Image: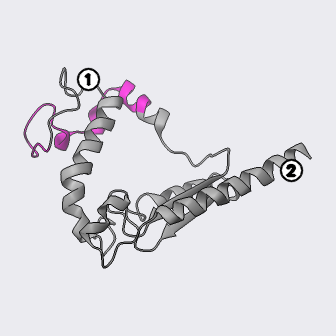
Amino acid sequence: MLAAGYPEGSEKLWGAHHERQWDFLQRVVREELDPGYDGAAEAGTPLCPEGTGAGCDTDYDFASRPPEVHRAVERVALTGRIRRPLISIQGTLDALTPPSTFGDVYDRMVTVAGRARLHRYVLVPGGTHVDGLIPYDTDRLRPMLPSFVSAFAELEAWTAKGSRTKAG
């Protein structure tokens, strides 16, 4: 998991994410973008082991899916071509969407797209994906809510300044 980019120090969260988020999230998103994969089943089979057979998301092979599935993914794919100010906030111990494989990558996408002036990327030391996971490791994890509140106020000020400039 560490070699895959999950942050060191997030190990205590892996079980909770596996039981409550990873599988569920992948099945819900896959059902939305590729509803034909598992036939009449709604969002597949929970926590099915690899090799279970048709409809098991652990066996999902995106490359072999029909062109309409690839087009559906393209429609929602991130490009970094943002048009409005955006503040992205991520915890350094996020074990659902690790910074090295999600937030850092998106920040680079925005920069490559020439939109860095519209983006601020905030990494919260000790933050995880949701504050409800803090009890899993109270020595390491810290709430992110204060950072979200501050960032929202910053975004309000940032966009208000931009509107005055346009109106002025």
Residue at the spot of label 2: 165
Q: Give residue 73's position: percent from left, percent from top.
A: 42, 35
Would you say the residues marked 2 and 1 are in contact, meaning their CB atoms lie under 8 Å apart?
no
User: Which one is nearer the viewer's eye here, 63 or 5?
Assistant: 5
What kind of residue is marked 2?
Answer: Thr
Residue at the spot of label 1: 36
Q: Nearer the viewer, mark 2 or mark 1?
A: 2
Quarter occupied by residue 151: bottom right
Residue 105 horizontal side relative to residue 46, left or right: right
Between disc 2 and disc 1, whose residue precedes?
1
Q: Give residue 124's position: percent from left, percent from top.
A: 48, 70
Density class for disc 1 (Cα within 10 Å; few <14, some 14-19, many ≥20) is some
**71 lies above or below 88:** above
- Secondary-structure class at tag 2: helix
What kind of residue is marked 1?
Answer: Gly
The N terminus: image quadrant: bottom left
Density class for disc 2 (Cα within 10 Å; few <14, some 14-19, many ≥20) is few
User: Given the current orientation, which residue lies at the most extreme top position?
Assistant: 40
Mark-to-mark CA distance, 2 and 1: 49 Å
